[in-house]
Amino acid sequence: MGNTYKNLDSVVATPIGTPVEPNTMNDYFQKQTKHAGLPVIRFHDLRHTHTTILLRMGGNPKLVSERMGHASVTITLDTYSHVLPDMQKDLATNLEIAMKNSRKTPPPSTLAD
C-alpha cells in the first residue's frame, strides 16, 4: 500500500492500516464462527476466555492484569472472581500435598555437630 498504509501497530486493521470498527469485526467474526460450525460468540468474548484460561492455569493475577491492560489487579480479580472458587480448592489441595510431603523429609538440623 506504500505511503497510503497507516501503521498503527494494530492487531486487526483495514487494508490501509486504520482501525476496524468494533461492530464490523464482531459481525465478521460471528459469520466466520457460524460458517465453521462453532458456537457464535462475540469477538470480545475471546478476551474473557483468554483471561480465564490464564488464571485457571495458575497465572499470576498481577501479570494477567497487566497483559489485559487493566488499571489494577483488583479489576481483574473482581471481574474474574467466578474462576477463584476452583482456584481456592486447588490451592488447598496443593497445600495439603505439600504438607504431607514435608512430613516425609526430616527438617534440617539446626544444631552444630
Image: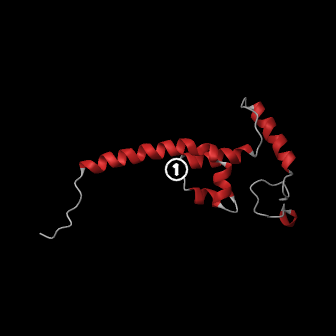
5 up-or-down from 52: above or below = below
Q: Name the residue carrying label 1.
A: 58
Residue 83 vs residue 1, the one in the foreground:
83
| Label 1 environment density (alpha carbons within 10 Å; few <14, some 14–19, many ≥20) | few
Image quadrant occupied by the N terminus: bottom right
- Residue ranking furthest to the left: 113
Residue at 65%, 58% in the rendered image: 74
Residue at 74%, 55% in the rendered image: 11
Residue 23 vs residue 108, the one in the foreground:
108
Q: Is residue 13 left or right of residue 65?
A: right
The x, y position of residue 108, in whole percent, is 22, 61
- Residue ranking furthest to the bottom: 112
Q: How many marks?
A: 1
Q: Is residue 4 left or right of residue 107?
A: right
Tag 1: amino acid: Gly
Image quadrant occupied by the C terminus: bottom left
In the figure, residue 34 lies in which quadrant?
top right
Label 1, secondary structure: give it: loop
The x, y position of residue 42, in whole percent, is 77, 41
Residue at 48%, 43% in the rendered image: 90
Residue 69 vs residue 16, the one in the foreground:
69
The x, y position of residue 20, in whole percent, is 84, 53
- Residue ranking furthest to the front: 111
